Amino acid sequence: MTRTCFGCLAKFKKTTDDPIPHPYIGAIAECWNVYGDILNKEFSDPAYFNVHRTTVDAYGAQHIGNQNDRRARQSANVHLIALYLTVSQKAENKNILTFIRHATKIKRDWPPLIQLKTPEWLTVQDIVKADNPSLHACLVTRWGQSVWEAYADCHQDIIKTYEKVIEEP
């Protein structure tokens, strides 16, 4: 029996009856567990860690959760903006982290995003297969690009949200 993740839409072999492992990240437990395996690899081996920022942002942007929840809106917007900074602006991780700290300092009302119905993107199932740091970095980079590209219809709104946030003191 398989289940489809309501975030990334990947199919997973059913392993649990716990459908929601996180309070506002919209993922099923099986997807969340594979994501955890990827994070474990990145934190266990410095050679894998260099693309960690993109891993977190690609996953967060795919799993936008219930957009009625302010935390889910914040997460989705911040991760998409981080992908914008990574993919389009080629920003350094330290600058992305500075933005994230600034953006999440106050509890603002972020605009809701719409869950994509038929995205063409990589998922954790593609990334977890990497058996060496070089392949992992290549796949994670492509993953981030594919997620950013999947939201092409929202790019202008995401960029406007970013510009609004950085203008705030």
Image (cartoon, rainbow, N blue to C red):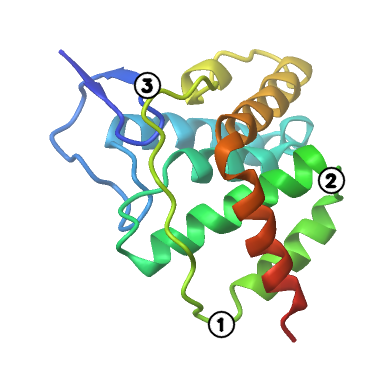
Query: In the rendering, at what x and y percent does residue 14 appear?
Result: 20, 21
- Binning the other alpha carbons within 10 Å of mark 3 as few (below 14), some (14 to 19) or many (20 upward) gives some
Query: In the rendering, at what x and y percent does residue 93 appear?
Result: 81, 52
- Binning the other alpha carbons within 10 Å of mark 1 as few (below 14), some (14 to 19) or many (20 upward) gives few
Query: In the rendering, at what x and y percent does residue 4 appear?
Result: 27, 24
Q: Earlier in the sequence, mark 3 or mark 2?
A: 3
Q: Residue 86 vs residue 38: left or right?
A: right
Question: CA–CA distance between discs 3 and 1?
Answer: 33 Å
- Binning the other alpha carbons within 10 Å of mark 2 as few (below 14), some (14 to 19) or many (20 upward) gives few
> Relative to residue 155, is residue 103 depicted above or below?
below
Q: Which residue is mark 3?
A: 10
**Picture quadrant where residue 145 is located:** top right
Query: Residue flagged by tag 1: what amino acid is it?
Result: Ile
Q: Which residue is mark 1?
A: 106
Q: Quadrant of the N terminus?
A: top left
Question: CA–CA distance between discs 3 and 2?
Answer: 28 Å
Q: Viewer-proximal residue, 80 or 44?
A: 80
**Picture quadrant where residue 100 is located:** bottom right
Q: Secondary structure at mark 3?
A: loop
Q: Secondary structure at mark 1?
A: loop
Residue furthest out toward the bottom: 169
Q: Quadrant of the C terminus?
A: bottom right
Query: Residue flagged by tag 2: what amino acid is it?
Result: Gln
Q: Which residue is mark 2?
A: 89
Question: CA–CA distance between discs 2 and 1?
Answer: 25 Å
